Image: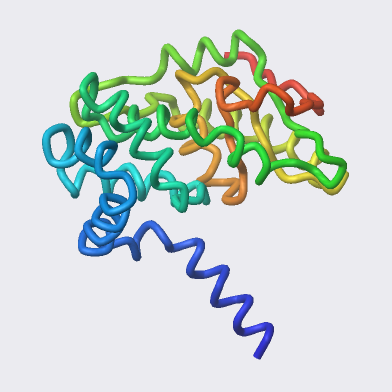
Amino acid sequence: TSVMATHLAALLRRHAADLLTREEVAGLIERLRQKSPAVVGEVVPDQLKTGQVQKVLQLLLRESVSIRDTEAIFEALADWAPRTKDPEMLNEYVRHALGRAICERCLGADGRLHAVTLDPNMEEFIDQAIERTERGSHLALSPETAAAVCAEVGDKLRALVEQGHPPVVLCAPQIRFRLRALLAARIPDVAVLALGELAPDVEVVVAGNAAVKV
């Protein structure tokens, strides 16, 4: 029974984004409205519709980011929704607000953040390969280049995991979302953090620097 419960909990976490319905988001908003009516009023419905909030929350859940701190999430949305309605962009701004919680989830047993970084040339190459449109963004890399990037980062992460640490990659904010999407297809449990998400008191240990000829 214990094994089945653990397996079920893991499945629910993995598919939490798909299970988050618009009706549940509406209920979440109403519960927060009772506690913090001002912050909700700044977001819904004048800036974002319930469906748009749902998309942001789903993006967070797909990367196993807790959405329990709804007040912090809505404060970030209140700050940035007047400037953009792009769910990907709003997701990144919300992640910045939740940086400490995100970092804590990725800490090693020694309380430090062990991570793989990317060579600056590699980051620049990926940034230039991101095509941004009104419908979102996508990474325009050839299958061979994409495989080479994943293989290089994967090799560095393998050494990290063998030392007993979670697989974490640190990168520039502008490429974080697309890099994570690329890596997650081959490394499902990888956590990709933007440098701006790091809490000031978190000690970072760079375990490797990924670089490929591009």
Quadrant where the image shows the N terminus: bottom right
Residue closest to the eye, 29 or 147? 29
Given the current orientation, which residue lies at the most extreme bottom position?
1
**Image: 16 above or below 3:** above
Picture residue at 80% right of the left edge, 39% below the top? 160
Residue closest to the eye, 153 or 170? 170
Q: Position of residue 20 (x, y in %)?
A: 32, 61
Q: Position of residue 148 (x, y in %)?
A: 60, 29
Residue closest to the eye, 125 or 145? 125
**Image: 203 above or below 7:** above
Residue 202, by quadrant, is: top right
Q: Position of residue 125 (x, y in %)?
A: 51, 12
Q: Horizontal placement of 116 versus 128: left or right?
A: right
Picture residue at 19% right of the left edge, 48% below the top? 51
Residue 162 visible at all? no
Residue 70 visible at all? yes
Residue 94, by quadrant, is: top left
Picture residue at 81% right of the left edge, 28% below the top? 207
**Image: 126 above or below 6:** above
Residue closest to the eye, 113 or 161? 113
Identify the colour scheme used.
rainbow
Q: Horizontal placement of 40 versus 68: left or right?
A: left
